[in-house]
């Protein structure tokens, strides 16, 4: 029997890691190929790794047909659902698969005529799709992830370099860390990956600190000094008010206090801004040093 390998279908699902591939190879050598390979006509649609290993070691295998598909997109949707049902698929891979499913369905609906869309909507009202992926909520449910995790995976797919994607796919770093690192320019992402797990985690931690800077004790002291500096002005203004007009005095004092508070707030923001610029400069210098090495 001739078996055709469709490169697009073979590469559609992320490849096994080296460890996973070797574990599968040992299992096939010891126990044989117990599960049949799935074909669509003569095209292999499930079992690409098993097929390659069986061919390499002359291990016998069985095949079975699935002729229910009308197009390659149908096959892809089936492959996605098939892999999502497996326990060994990582959280990152599950998120990627669910997002791919949404992309196929969205593209299909755009290409349909108004009549087809109306018929589909009527059918959906009668028989709701149990695995709909219209919203991020539904994508998260299909993937078995939280909505924030799905959003992070979307960001990784859009902005991460291949090196960073491989790091999170292999489990070297978490989805959260990879999403943070993907905010950096491409060359700095590559440099961080080259530095290893600790370097990636440190870069992510520094980026988070830059985004949400904490007010240091020096900043607090400077803010306090600025506040104290404005106090004499408040006191002088208050004492110079005509005590025969209490309503006017109260309004004037309130205005002075408000102006003083605004001055203190501006000073605090200025100091925080300087601290933030310094943190960004230090982070950029560290990443440049890693890239240079």
Image (cartoon, helix red, strand yellow):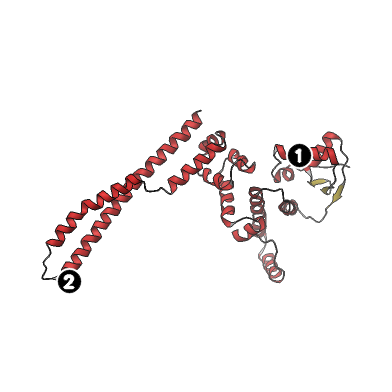
User: What x and y, as percent, mark residue 208?
Assistant: 47, 46
Task: Identify the residue under disc 1.
Answer: 23
Foreground of the two, 216 or 34: 216
Residue marked by disc 2: 247
Quarter that holds the N terminus: top right
Q: Residue 105, relative to residue 216: is it above or below?
A: below
Please tell me how crowded label 1 is: few (under 14), some (14-19), or many (20+) other residues with Cα within 10 Å: few
Q: Along the horizontal axis of the image, is 29 left or right of 185?
A: right
The CA distance from mark 1 to mark 2 is 84 Å
Q: Secondary structure at mark 1?
A: helix
Vertical order, 114 against 213 (above or below): below
Residue 60 in the image, given as x and y percentages of width and height: 88, 40
Closer to the chain start, of discs 1 and 2, is: 1
Determine the residue positioned at 72% across, 44% down.
8
Residue drawn at x 18%, y 58% as measured from the top left: 234
Numbered label attached to residue 216: none
């Amino acid at each position: 029997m001739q078996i055709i390998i469709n490169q697009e279908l073979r590469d559609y699902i992320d490849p096994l890691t080296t460890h996973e591939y070797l574990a599968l190879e040992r299992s096939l050598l010891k126990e044989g190929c117990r599960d049949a390979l799935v074909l669509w006509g003569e095209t292999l649609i499930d079992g690409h790794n098993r097929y390659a290993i069986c061919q390499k070691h002359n291990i016998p295998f069985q095949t079975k047909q699935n002729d229910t598909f009308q197009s390659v997109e149908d096959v892809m949707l089936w492959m996605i659902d098939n892999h999502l049902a497996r326990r060994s698929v990582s959280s990152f891979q599950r998120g990627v698969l669910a997002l791919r499913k949404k992309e196929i369905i969205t593209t299909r609906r755009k290409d349909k005529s108004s009549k087809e869309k109306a018929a589909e909507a009527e059918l959906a009202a009668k028989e709701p799709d149990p695995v709909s992926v219209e919203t991020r909520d539904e994508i998260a449910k299909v993937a078995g992830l939280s909505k924030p995790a799905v959003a992070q995976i979307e960001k990784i797919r859009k902005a991460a370099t291949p090196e960073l994607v491989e790091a999170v796919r292999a489990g070297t770093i978490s989805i959260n860390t990879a999403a943070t690192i993907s905010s950096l320019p491409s060359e700095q992402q590559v440099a961080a990956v080259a530095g290893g797990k600790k370097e990636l985690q440190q870069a992510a931690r520094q980026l988070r600190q830059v985004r949400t800077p904490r007010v240091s004790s020096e900043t607090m002291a400077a803010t306090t000094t600025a506040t104290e500096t404005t106090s004499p002005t408040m006191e002088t203004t208050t004492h110079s008010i005509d005590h025969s007009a209490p309503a006017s005095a109260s309004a004037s004092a309130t205005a002075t206090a408000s102006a003083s508070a605004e001055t203190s707030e501006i000073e605090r923001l200025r100091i925080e801004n300087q601290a933030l610029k310094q943190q960004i400069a230090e982070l950029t210098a560290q990443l440049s040093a890693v890239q240079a090495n």
